[in-house]
Amino acid sequence: MTLSRPQAMAHFDMAIPHAATSLKQLKENGTKVVGYYCMFAPQEVALAAGAQPVALCATKEEPIADGEKTLPRNFCPLIKSSYGFAVTDKCPFFLHSDLIVGETTCDGKKKMFELMAKFKPVHVMNLPQGYAAEEDKAYWLAAVEKLKKYLETSLDVEITDAKLAAAIKERNAERRLIQELADLTKHDPVPLSGQDMLKVLWAHNFVFDRQEFAAQVRELVGELKEQAARGEGALPKGAKRIVVTGVPTGIGAEKVLKIIEDCGAAVVYIENCSGMKQFVTLVDEDKPALAAIADKYLGTHCSCMSPNPRRMELVAEVARDWRADGVVDVVWQGCHTYNVEGRVLKDYLRDNGNVPYLQIETDYSQGDVEQIKTRVQAFLEMMG
Amino acid sequence: MAAEQEIVAGVDAGSTAIKVTLFDGTAMANYLEPAGWNPRETATVLLSKAAGLRGVKAGGLARVYGTGYGRVGLGFLAKAVTEITCHARGAAYMAPEARTVIDIGGQDVKAIRIDGAGRVRDFVMNDKCAAGTGRFLQVMAGALGMDLGTMAALPADGDACPINAMCTVFAESEVIGLLNRGTPRETIVAGLYKSIAGRVAAMAARITPCPPVVLTGGVALHQALHKALENELGLKVTIPGEAVFAGSIGAALLAWEDLRRKGE
């Protein structure tokens, strides 16, 4: 059987290399740039302010040494990388950002933002500890309203309901399109590798012409449907099917995804924040815009929420629908919430579908690749 | 005819020792050499020597499967299988009733839940850190001025002084400090075993160990550690006679099964 890679992937191979230049052009044409790190930052509010939201660098090992000059060594690599990139101006997106929207997703990040605010305008959104209670929802809506006012004042614009509604429509259309793409990896053989899926989802943050991005994804979806109809795959038919969950594993930090696929298994679904997490729910277009935005973003099933039943339910559901042979939960060293929640998830998956579970605790370095490979191989051998 | 008899081999290229098991469906023989500075060479020579004792050349073995830390470097293998799968299979062969395997090797520790056929149901392994492994004991034996054999034979099941450092480097300084204060070596070694056993038991709790538990790997030779581990786990732990060879035995059995399957 020949293994195939869609030609449309060429767009996404070039998306990130081109991104810095296109952002610079936008900037030179007068567009304001709002940098963010996390999925809790409501992108529609920035869009409605006429600004370009852009994801900031946090997924490479290289600037960690610079991060460690200020931050403790036993911090999670994502925070050290973010800070190292920012403080050295090695992240062009940070450099071009007029302001940064942060959020209190964890203790490390909120304290890091205090340091970052010394050299960049930073607006930190306060998150409640849960997504279910009415008082938590009200608290978060106030934080979103505060962000709106902050952007209006700092960027000297008015954020109208009409602009918010237009931004919601645009982003919802993208979410539906990405859901359609993700549905295709239910096929066996899987038509797109997990590493390529990551590249597409990552490009979502770095192609600033939304029409262009949507057209590229549509082209890819079309090609994948034809491939699937011909029975062609990116990995062999019958390859073990793995759902990856846990911490964000963006480009530069995709070590575990690569190991899984190097071992011959297929990553059929990336559930984490660099994967599908932001695309699985829409903003309700029938509700008042700001409240609907607040609702969608607060519902993000991040381990910083306590308790976090939605993640358990969703991972079990995905494992069933994508016919997964196992779930691999990636945890960055120092990320206590994902680390502890691993135990909750393991038990939940045992009781709901009896899905084999493997937790991998690691960082951005390559020093433990062989050890991780042994665990992943043993996990795949266990499935028979 | 002897020439018709097919023999398979399992090679466990561990961080400290190379183990080879030959198996012909009935008779099993085990061989061991320290890994030395060139584990690939050691494994090749040991395999040839073992095969030679059965009157065949290494190339005449029907199938050679490899496992262990050094498995990736062995070019002559028909297949490389992880030490987790192999230890489970090997331990179940030696102790068919076993449901949990704890393996303490030269530089890693693993706890494995298995079913009656020796198949892995769940497992957990230590991370990059060497605390609680054979390497940890080797460094501590050095600090105590004895070799590992002497340490293993020490009657260290009496009083244990607490050793608090988890890190090998800090634990070594702690041991040197204790020696300087005149603490008896038996008490220190008992403390080290207690600290390792506590660490291993905490790790094993992640897979909810259920009895019977067997202990494999080179560190199983330390008898006082065996007792300490039983105390910390709150479960009886048995050590099979060929505990050191669980990995190579498992690899040989898997090679044999695949050979039979092909023959059918």
Image: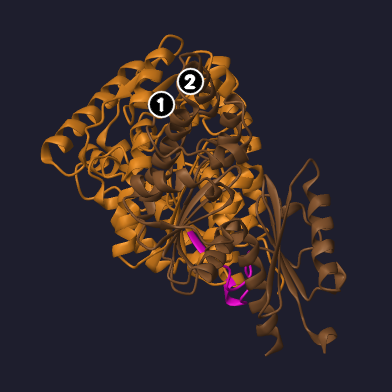
Chain colours: A orange, B brown
Residue B174's mark? 2
The magenta segment is A228-242
Q: Are marks 1 and 2 in contact (CB under 8 Å)?
A: yes
Q: Residue shown at 57%/17% (left/top)?
A: A66
What amino acid type is highlighted by mark number 2?
A: Glu
Q: Secondary structure at mark 2?
A: helix
Q: Is residue A62 left or right of residue A122?
A: right
Q: Is residue B238 above or below residue A27?
A: below
Q: Main secondary structure of the magenta part?
A: loop
Residue A253's mark? none
Q: Is residue A64 above or below residue A270?
A: above
What amino acid type is highlighted by mark number 1?
A: Asn
* Image coords of residue A343 (percent x, y): 33, 49
Cα–Cα gap, marks 1 and 2? 8 Å
Q: Which subunit holds the residue at mark 2?
A: B
Q: Is residue A234 above or below residue A12?
A: below
